[in-house]
Structure formats: structure tokens, C-alpha cells
Image (cartoon, rainbow, N blue to C red):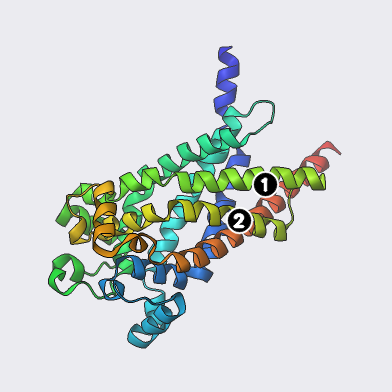
């Protein structure tokens, strides 16, 4: 019994799990590089006070940023986002697929098990990478206009890099500030967990229908878009709260997640919780679809090479 348990946990450290992690990381970075301006728009609509009472669509905001800040405004903070996303996707994909290997029973998988393991992987990811995302939000909003009576030293501070930002926030606001928004982030592990559960469930069905070991690239695009659309709509209000806490908005200080949601509804109505969702859906659905496309192609390519090399060794 002891030997079986050890062997099971040994599955956490395998070459296959590493391939999944690197593929997911590469796919995420590729997708974000292409669709990053839409993420910038989403952040501005969620946090920037100048858009608080203005009902502008995604492309109107893009035009505003281009007029006021130029093309650089749309890509503000891209480098730290790519660094954080690379680390975040690696941790998530490695944790998810590693745990799947550990707890798989005779190679079988279920939607319920994927949901639980996805939530655990998400929690690990949040605890390890939240400081990177806090700096990301600050750097992304450096070109935005803060509320006039809230302009202070924090809002005017410039972070040279993600590591400089981590150091500065820890020194000036305390180490705890680096985990601002961690609570809604932990609740939001349901987002990728739901996404992965739906994606893997649909993927298994497609594989059974097609009687194939892997899905086509176009199918991965579609499944990725469907799974991310559902998970985003279900969890978007919490993403808005998360953005406000990471940015360090003054009206959110000393308030918990529920209090912030109540404050936003009382001040600006329920619609304020969904500010920027159009841009978020465009960005996240397109990016996730492309990420899964790249992920499936990379893993398929690597595993095919491994199979070929094994055949050659047998010969």
C-alpha cells in the first residue's frame, strides 16, 4: 500500500506534466501578446474614474486611449503582464495536470474531479503569483487619470519593472499590500476551474465522437471560447472587485469583498459590477481560444516526437 502511494505522488513530477505546463505557458503568452489592448480597455473601464459615468464601448475607449496616450497607452504594462502570465500559467497547468496524474484512477477522468483539482491548482497559483498581478495592475494604470481628490503619491509613483514594483510596494505600503485582492482571487479560482472542467468535459466528448486521441486545432479554439465565455460571465463581478483591490482604490480601503460589491451597487447600480465585460469577453474568449489552440498543438507535437523516439529505441 505504501509503495502504491509513493508511486502515485511520483506522478506529480513527470516529463508529461512539464510539457503541459510549458505548453500552457507558451500558449497564454502568445494569446495575450495579440489581444492585450482589449485587456487594457477592460482595466480602464473597471478602475479609471474618468469612465465611471460614461457609457462607452470597447472601441470608443481604444480610440480615446490612442488620442490621449498614443499606441503606447494600449500596451502599457505589457512586459510585466507577460512575465506574470508566463509564471501563472506554468504554475496552474503544472498543478492541474500533475494532480490529475496523481489522482487519476486507471486513466479515467470526471468533470467533478477536474473541478476540484482545478480549484486546488488555482489556489496554489493565487498564493504564489498575486504579488506579480498587483504590480501589473499598478503599471497598467500608470497612464490613467486618477480621481482628482485621490491623486496621491501612490498614484503618481512610477514602477520601472515588475521586480522594482514588488520592492517599492513592500517598502511603502507593507508586504500585505502585495496580496491585495487575494481573497476575491481565491474565490475566483472557480473561474479557471469551471473553464477547465467544461473544456475537458467537452474535449472528452469530442474525442469519443471522433474516436481520436486528440482534438483538432479548430475544435480546441471553439471549446476554449465556449468554456471561457461561461466561466467569465459567471464570475465577472468578482473580477471587478479584484481589479479595484489590486489597484488600491481609496474607496475600497478597509472594506471586504461583500462591502465593496454593496458600495458599488449603491453608488452606481448593479451595472457597475459588469463595467468592461464586453472588452473582457472579447479579450479573454479570443485569448483563451488561441491559448488552447497553441497548447494542444505544442503538446501534440512534443508527445508525437516522444512516441517516435520510443519506437526508434525499440527498433
Q: Position of residue 256 (x, y in %)?
A: 24, 47
* Residue 136 image-quadrant placement: bottom left
Q: Quadrant location of residue 132?
A: bottom left
Question: What kind of element bears circle 1?
Answer: helix
Q: Is residue 284 above or below residue 1?
A: below
Of 207 and 18, the residue lying toward us: 207
**Label 1 crowd bin: few (<14), some (14–19), many (20+), radius 10 Å:** some
Q: For the point 55% across and 48% down, which residue is it?
A: 195
- Figure quadrant of the C terminus: top right
- Horizontal relation, residue 64 to residue 206: left or right: left
Image x and y of residue 126, in percent = 38, 45
Res. 259 visible in picture: yes
For the point 27% across and 51% down, the residue is: 180
Q: Residue furthest right?
A: 315
Locate residue 150: give its quadrant: bottom left
Where residue 250 appears, x then y in whole percent?
A: 18, 60
Q: Nearer the viewer, residue 114 or 121?
A: 114
How many marks are shown on the rendered structure? Answer: 2
Q: Residue at x 65, y 43 (%)?
A: 201
Indicate left or right for 206 with 155 as reference: right
Structural distance between the alpha carbons of marks 1 and 2: 10 Å
Left or right of 220 in this view: 91: left
Q: Are marks 1 and 2 in contact (CB under 8 Å)?
A: yes
Give whichever of discs 1 and 2 has the lower sequence position. 1
Q: Which residue was labeled with disc 1?
A: 202
Residue denoted by label 2 = 226
- State the residue in front, 262 or 80: 262
Q: Could you say whether the residue bearing mark 2 is in a helix, strand or loop?
A: helix
Amino acid at each position: 500500500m505504501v509503495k502504491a502511494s509513493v508511486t502515485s505522488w511520483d506522478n506529480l513530477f513527470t516529463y508529461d506534466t512539464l510539457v503541459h505546463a510549458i505548453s500552457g505557458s507558451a500558449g497564454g503568452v502568445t494569446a495575450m501578446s495579440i489581444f492585450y489592448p482589449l485587456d487594457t480597455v477592460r482595466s480602464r473601464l473597471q478602475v479609471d474614474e474618468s469612465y465611471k459615468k460614461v457609457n462607452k464601448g470597447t472601441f470608443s475607449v481604444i480610440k480615446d486611449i490612442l488620442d490621449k496616450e498614443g499606441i503606447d497607452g494600449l500596451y502599457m504594462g505589457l512586459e510585466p503582464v507577460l512575465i506574470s502570465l508566463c509564471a501563472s500559467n506554468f504554475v496552474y497547468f503544472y498543478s492541474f495536470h500533475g494532480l490529475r496524474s496523481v489522482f487519476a484512477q486507471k486513466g479515467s477522468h470526471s468533470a467533478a474531479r477536474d473541478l476540484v483539482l482545478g480549484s486546488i491548482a488555482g489556489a496554489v497559483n493565487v498564493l504564489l503569483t498575486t504579488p506579480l498581478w498587483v504590480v501589473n495592475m499598478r503599471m497598467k494604470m500608470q497612464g490613467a487619470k486618477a480621481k482628482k481628490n485621490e491623486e496621491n503619491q501612490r498614484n503618481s509613483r512610477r514602477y520601472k519593472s515588475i521586480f522594482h514594483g514588488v520592492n517599492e510596494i513592500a517598502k511603502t505600503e507593507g508586504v500585505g499590500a502585495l496580496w491585495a485582492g487575494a481573497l476575491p482571487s481565491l474565490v475566483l479560482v472557480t473561474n479557471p476551474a469551471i473553464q477547465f472542467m467544461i473544456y475537458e468535459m467537452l474535449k472528452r466528448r469530442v474525442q469519443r465522437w471522433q474516436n481520436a486521441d486528440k482534438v483538432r486545432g479548430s475544435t480546441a479554439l471553439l471549446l476554449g471560447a465556449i468554456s471561457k465565455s461561461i466561466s467569465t460571465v459567471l464570475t465577472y463581478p468578482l473580477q471587478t472587485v479584484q481589479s479595484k483591490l489590486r489597484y488600491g482604490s481609496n474607496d475600497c480601503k478597509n472594506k471586504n469583498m461583500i462591502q465593496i460589491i454593496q458600495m458599488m451597487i449603491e453608488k452606481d447600480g448593479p451595472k457597475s459590477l459588469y463595467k468592461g465585460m464586453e472588452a473582457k469577453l472579447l479579450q479573454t474568449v479570443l485569448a483563451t481560444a488561441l491559448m488552447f489552440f497553441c497548447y494542444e498543438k505544442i503538446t501534440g507535437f512534443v508527445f508525437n516526437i516522444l512516441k517516435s523516439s520510443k519506437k526508434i529505441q525499440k527498433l
